[in-house]
Image (tube, rainbow, N blue to C red):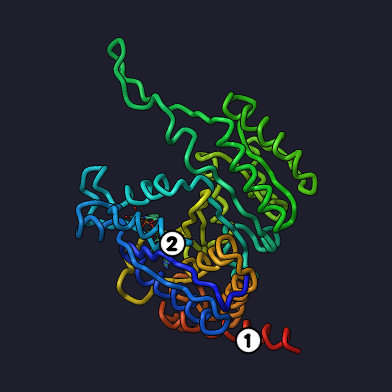
Amino acid sequence: MNDMQSLYRIAVLAGDGIGPEVTAEAVKVLKAIEEINGPTFRFQSGLIGGCALDQTASPLPAETISICNNSNAVLLGAVGGPQWDSKRPELRPEQGLLQIRQRLGLYCNLRPAKVLDALVNMSALKPPRVKGTDLVIVRELMGGIYFGNPRGIFTKNGERYGVNTEIYREHEVERVAHRAFQLARLRRHKVTSVDKANVLESSRLWREVVTRIGQSYTDVELNHLYVDSCAMQLIDRPTSFDVILTNNMFGDILSDEAAMLTGSIGLLPSASLGEHSALYEPVHGSAPDIAGRNKANPLAAIASAALMLRYTLRMESAALAIEEAIERILKRGVRTADLPGKARPTSTTKMGDLIAETTQKILKSANSKKKR
Ligand code: NAD
């Protein structure tokens, strides 16, 4: 497709706390790309989380769902804050997030964990062990123990039982497995499927289905690990992983472990994909402790916009330009307050300006090379 003629609708759900600050920087970078490479981005804002509760009494108003359904992709900031913590569970900002995943059918969550050379000292591990780590966790997001029935706390024979049920249907495993293999084809052609097939029937089905799907991707190497072994190997030899495919609960835990390999929550982007929708958001929360002070690190939100360009809008060169800009700026020693460094910390808006300018420079230079 010729970018000059493309129009992309992006729903912007900035949310609470630092959400609006970091999302504004991601939009700034997308507008900078628009100036150079010509696709038109049409941004439309919607409410989600605490700000939506305050204005509409719902954490996910119908209007927001409609905006998302009419968009090519959704860019989300973060939700939540102490002012809503005492509300009933169904009236908490986080409900907005859970509901939007269900409403948009986002069954596949991608969490990249890449250790940047400029920040290798921030890792929880020693640099020689972690240098070069570049992996993605593909987590099934709509099934498994978080949603299975029966669930609840019941009393039987005078004793209370807490019950949750892990259920996976074959098609739920198939669709997320296809995503993982397709992703591996864009990377280093390796999928590690993680389960607990030595104990759980749901995992035995998982392994059987992933193995079958893998037979149609003969160019991708597939191996299987039990989740306990994977947790160890992530620490022992993190550079050996490419794509890790796993269920909802194991993915929840392993993706936080992988985050510690990179050392900073302010840098980690994520994508949640469905058949017809996709939502991109930083991994971090609304950071109420620093909200409104122009101190937040916008790089995770900006890197989430890069994932949007790559996976939904198929603008790989623009995605790479943003990622390259982030690396260059960090290599130069520029740091927001959450990152250790010698120079005076830079503000959220200044960091956004630098990434936008550098992304433009990278794209201009690539365009002039193409013309030559
Ligand atoms: P958090 O991620 O908001 O903050 C944890 C710590 O990291 C804080 O010290 C914060 O200042 C810092 N931090 C986070 N993002 C940063 C950034 N971009 N730049 C600089 N520093 C950053 O997690 P929390 O404190 O556990 O939760 C705060 C609120 O966010 C809660 O209401 C929680 O429910 C919500 N939350 C939302 C999401 C989401 O929207 N996806 C995710 C996690 C937590």
| Mark 1: C-beta under 8 Å from nearest atom of ligand 1 | no
Regarding ligand 1, which quadrant of the image does it lie in? Answer: bottom left
* x, y percent for residue 149: 41, 26
First-in-chain label (1 vs 2):
2
Circle nearer the viewer, 1 or 2 = 2
The residue wearing badge 2 is 71
* x, y percent for residue 282: 46, 61
Q: Is residue 342 at all visible to an observer of this figure?
A: no
* x, y percent for residue 192: 69, 44
Dot 1 amino acid type: Lys
Q: Nearer the viewer, residue 328 or 210?
A: 210
Dot 2 amino acid type: Ser
Going by the picture, which residue comes out furthest to the front? 5
* x, y percent for residue 101: 42, 48
- In the picture, the quarter occupied by the N terminus is bottom right
Going by the picture, which residue comes out furthest to the top? 157
The residue wearing badge 1 is 364
Residue that appears at 41% across and 55% down: 69
